[in-house]
């Protein structure tokens, strides 16, 4: 089973650019949206809107609140998420194709 977010959650993740080195995804959802499990390779995330989300990886949960215009490193990971705020989530992910595979012990969510 593929855990590619463009396949597991096609209503929310759209591939907007791809070449041999990177793939760029646009993500958009509404308050209350819950995604199915998916994975991301090492990525850079740029937020186009301010939002609050809950990210879940196994038994671990993390709530994040990000302002529009935030840029952050997203280490390879597998999770599902939920928009727990009052605003849509709108973000761009630049996935690196030469990154490491996600692990169960990886950091959940974006990091500085």
Image (tube, grey):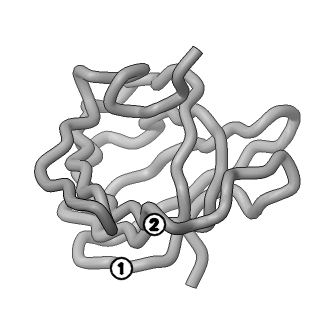
Q: Quadrant of the C terminus?
A: bottom right
**Side of 99 relative to 52 (left or right):** right
Q: Toward which corner of the image does residue 91 lie, by quadrant? A: bottom left
Is residue 106 or residue 48 the one in the foreground? 106
* Furthest-front residue in this view: 20
Q: Earlier in the sequence, mark 1 or mark 2?
A: 2
Residue at image point 40% right, 72% down = 44
- Residue count near mark 2 (Cα–Cα under 10 Å), binned few <14, some 14–19, many ≥20: many
Q: Toward which corner of the image does residue 14 lie, by quadrant? A: top left
**Side of 73 relative to 23 (left or right):** right
- Percent from the top left, x then y, of residue 84? 47, 37
Residue at image point 74% right, 63% down = 107
From what the image shows, is residue 21 above or below residue 4?
Answer: below
Q: Toward which corner of the image does residue 100 lie, by quadrant? A: bottom right
Q: Secondary structure at mark 1?
A: strand
- Percent from the top left, x then y, of residue 18? 20, 55
Q: Which mark is residue 71?
A: 1
Q: Quadrant of the N terminus?
A: top right
* Furthest-top residue in this view: 1
Judging by the rendered image, the residue that carries numbered circle 2 is 43
| Residue depth check, mark 1 versus mark 2: number of the one nearer the observer | 2
Is residue 13 or residue 62 the one in the foreground? 13
């Amino acid at each position: 089973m593929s855990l590619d977010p463009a396949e597991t959650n096609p209503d929310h993740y759209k591939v907007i650019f791809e070449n041999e080195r990177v793939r760029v995804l646009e993500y958009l959802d509404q308050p209350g949206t819950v995604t199915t499990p998916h994975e991301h390779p090492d990525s850079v995330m740029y937020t186009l809107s301010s939002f609050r989300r809950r990210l879940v990886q196994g038994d671990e949960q993390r709530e994040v609140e990000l302002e529009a215009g935030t840029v952050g490193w997203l280490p390879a990971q597998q999770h599902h998420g939920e928009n727990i705020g009052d605003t849509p989530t709108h973000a761009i992910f630049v996935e690196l194709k030469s990154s490491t595979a996600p692990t169960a012990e990886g950091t959940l969510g974006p990091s500085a």
